[in-house]
Image (tube, rainbow, N blue to C red):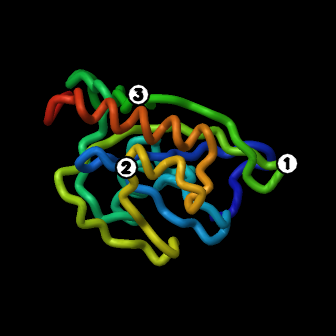
Amino acid sequence: MPHIHELYDFVNAVFIVHEDKVLFVNHPRYGKWISIGGHIELDEDPDQSLLREIAEESGLEVEIMSHKPAVGSAEEKILYTPNYMEAHDANPPHRHIALIYFAKTKSGDFKKSAEHTDMRWLGASDLDSPEYKLTPALKFYGLQAIELAKKWPTNNS
């Protein structure tokens, strides 16, 4: 997707966990392993974008590990709270403001998107492998997602 704004765009990233492993994709445009995610389009709120990216890039049914109370109205939609937020370079001087989410799934049967050259479930010990060249932040998010999934009750809202 082309950039919406000259200097910053909002994006999401989701670290999906299954059986103590987290899903990473090999993204050819960036030439590295990253999480699933993408731009929040002008006609989307962050929740819509997050769920669209998960469906497009993995086909997995997930539970977002975020507390979201069942309140609101037609005028008020409570959104998932990101686990973290960050700003990072994306074709400098352009940068992304990323909303980082953690999710879990009952099935490890993802559908690889044509957008990526490979997808793999990585365990905690895989995150330091030179093969994946993960940044310190990606390793941190992956480990944090795995740890939260161990404690997260199913169907929490």
The front one of 76 and 126 is 126
Q: Residues within 10 Å of mark 1 (few under 14, many from 20)?
A: few
Say which label, 2 or 1, has the lower sequence index.
Answer: 1
CA gap, disc 2 and disc 3:
25 Å
Q: Residue furthest right?
A: 93
Instruction: Please report the residue visible at 56 percent of the width from the left and 31 percent of the height from the top.
Output: 85
- Judging depth in this view, the residue of 141 and 43 nearest the camera is 141
**Label 1 element class:** loop
Judged from the image, the secondary structure of the residue bearing numbered disc 2 is: strand
Q: CA distance from mark 2 to mark 1?
A: 34 Å
Classify 66 as above or below 137: above
Of callouts 2 and 3, which one flags the residue occurring earlier in the amino acid sequence? 3
Marking on residue 93: 1
| Residue 150 placement (x, y as % from top left) | 24, 33
Q: Quadrant of the N terminus?
A: bottom right
Instruction: Identify which amino acid the numbered label 2 is placed on.
Output: Gly
The quadrant where residue 104 appears = top left
